[in-house]
Image: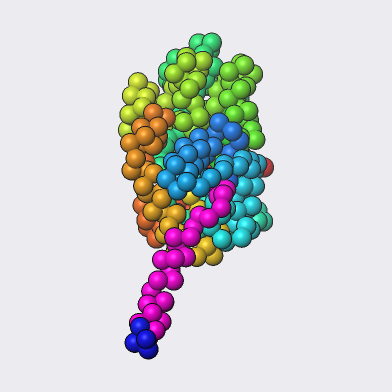
Amino acid sequence: MRRRSLLTALALPIAAPALAQGAWPSRPVRIISSSPPAGASDILSRTVAAALQEQTGQSFLVENRAGAGGVVGSDFVAKSAPDGYTWLTTNVGPQAIFRELVRNMPYDTRNDFRHVTIIGTLPVVLIVNKDLPFRTLAEYVAAAKARPGAINFGSGGNGTLHHLTAELLKAAAGIDITHVPYRGAQAATADVLGGRIEGMIDSLPSAAVHIRSGNVRALAVSSAGRSSAFPEIPTFAESGYPGVVTTNWFSIAGPARVPEEIIQAMYAQLKRALESGAVRERLASIGVDPRGDPPDVTQRYIHGEIDRWGEVVRRTGVTMD
C-alpha cells in the first residue's frame, strides 16, 4: 500500500498538466472579431469557430467588437481574464501598424497579447464601382492624374493596411486621390456599390462576393503574385508598381497571461482545423493562404511585423489625423 501511494504521489505532477489541458474548454468560448460583420476578420473568425465547435463539442461564439480599425476589440481582449475563454481575431493593423500611428494606445502590442497562430495571409484589392469608365489600373491612374483630388477611395479605417496600401500607390504613381476612412470595410463597400465613392482598397475575402457577382470591378491585388482564387486580377507589381506589395495576416490571440497549457491546447485545435479539407477549401475560395505556425514562431513573426510597419509608416508620413 505504501509503495502504491508513493507511486501515485510521484505521478500527480505529471498528470496534472494533462488534466488541466483536457478540461479546456469546459464552457462556451468567445472569439472577438475586431471587424464588423462581413469583414475579413469576421469571415475568418466564423470559419474557424465552426470548425473548433465541431472538433471540441463546445460552443465557440463569434462576437463583433468593431471600432478604431480594430483597436476596440483588441483592447477588450487585452484586458479580459486570461482564462482561455476569450480570444481575438486580429491583424496587421491594430497589432503592428497602429503601434507607430496611434498616440496613447490603450494596449501594448508587444507585451499584452499571446498569439497562438496565424490563420492565414491575404492581399488587399483595389475595387471600383462597376459603372465607372476605367477598367484597368492604368486607366484609373490616368483619371486620377487628369483630376487631382477628385477621385475618392475608401478604406476600413484610417491608418489600416487598406489605407497604407493606397498611400504606397499614391507615392509610386504620383497621383492625388482622396482618402475616405470608414468604421469598417462593410460601410465603405456599401458606398462603392451605391456609387457614392469611386472605389476602395478592401480585403480580398470581403470583396470576393462582389467581384464574383460583377457588382464591382477589381483592378489590382497587393500580393507579390496573382491570387489563386482570382487569377484574372493583375497585381500592382505587374501593373508597373513593384513597391506596392502588401500582405495582411490574421492571427488568433489571447491576453498575455493565458496559461501555456491552454495556449498549446488552442493551437492543437486550430492546427487541426487548418489542416481540414473543408476549412482549407473555404479559405482558398476567398483568397486566403492558410498558415498555422506554432505559437512561439507566430509571436516572433508578429514582433518582426511591428518593426517592419513602423518603418513604412515613418517613410510614407501617414498620420491618424
User: Where are the magenta residues, as a range?
Assistant: 5-31
Helix, strand or loop for the magenta stretch, by majority: helix
Does residue 228 sit above or below 192 in this rendering?
A: below
Question: Which quadrant holds the N terminus?
Answer: bottom left
Task: Name the residue located 47 percent from the left edge and 65 percent from the top edge.
Answer: 20
Q: Is residue 30 magenta?
A: yes
Query: Which residue is depicted at the point 44% across and 22% down?
Result: 219
Toward the viewer: 114 or 100? Answer: 114
Q: Is residue 10 above or below residue 31?
A: below
The x, y position of residue 86, in whole percent, is: 57, 53
In the picture, measured across the screen, residue 171 lies left or right of residue 229, that is right
Q: Locate residue 297: give its quadrant.
A: bottom left
Task: Inspect the magenta stretch and tell me whether residue 190 lies in it.
Answer: no
Q: Residue at x 33, y 24 (%)?
A: 231
Q: Place residue 190 in its image quadrant.
A: top right
Horizontal and vertical percent for residue 233? 38, 23
